[in-house]
Image (spheres, helix red, strand yellow):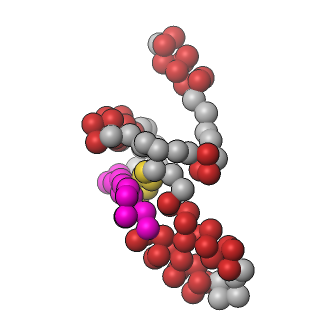
């Protein structure tokens, strides 16, 4: 148990803008998602799933996010619109959890 606590104590969140490639490879991602799927589900939210955005998928999703943001915020500043469009493109890989 001490190794687990030590590893958990070392984890840190970083701002998305500081993330750089490469992201995890397929094997590493599979392992991460397998472990993540074992989290407690106290809210009984299962079934749920992961959506992985990588490569051009991040750009395609960004176009959808931009369109939704423009529809919701028609008077938004162009810089904010660009931020929303590029939101998923900052990191080398994005994993969404859907329940």
Q: 35 left or right of 6?
A: left
The percent position of residue 93, horizontal first and vertical second, equals 43, 51
| Residue at the limit of the structure toward the top, as seen here | 2
- State the image quarter where residue 74 is shown: bottom right
Residue 77: image quadrant is bottom right
Reply yes or no: does residue 22 show up in magenta.
no
| Placement of the C terminus among the 4 image quadrants | bottom left
Can you say whether 24 is above or below 44 in the image?
above
Please say if 86 is above or below 27.
Answer: below
Foreground of the two, 83 or 45 = 83
Residue 96 appears anywhere in the view = yes
**How many numbered marks, from 0 up?**
0
Q: Is residue 54 above or below residue 20?
A: below
Q: Position of residue 95 (x, y in %)?
A: 42, 52
Write the residue at 61% across / 45% down: 18
Q: Magenta stretch: give its range.
A: 46-59
Image x and y of residue 73, in percent: 65, 83
Residue toward you, 69 or 19: 19
Q: Residue at x 58, y 79 (%)?
A: 69
Q: Give 37 or 21, whichever is nearer the viewer.
A: 21
Looking at the image, the residue that sits furthest to the front is 21
Can residue 38 be spotted in the picture? no
Q: Residue at x 33, y 40 (%)?
A: 25
Does the magenta portion include 54?
yes
In the picture, measured across the screen, residue 20 lies left or right of residue 58, that is right
Residue at 55 percent across and 16 percent down: it is 6
């Amino acid at each position: 148990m001490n190794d687990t606590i030590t590893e958990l104590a070392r984890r840190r969140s970083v701002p998305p803008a500081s993330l750089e490639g490469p992201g995890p490879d397929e094997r590493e991602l599979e392992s991460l998602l397998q472990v993540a799927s074992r989290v407690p589900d106290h809210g009984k939210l299962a079934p749920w799933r992961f959506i992985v955005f990588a490569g051009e998928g991040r750009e395609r999703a960004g176009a959808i996010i931009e369109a939704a943001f423009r529809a919701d915020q028609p008077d938004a500043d162009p810089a904010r619109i660009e931020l929303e469009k590029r939101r998923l493109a900052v990191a080398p890989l994005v994993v969404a959890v859907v329940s």
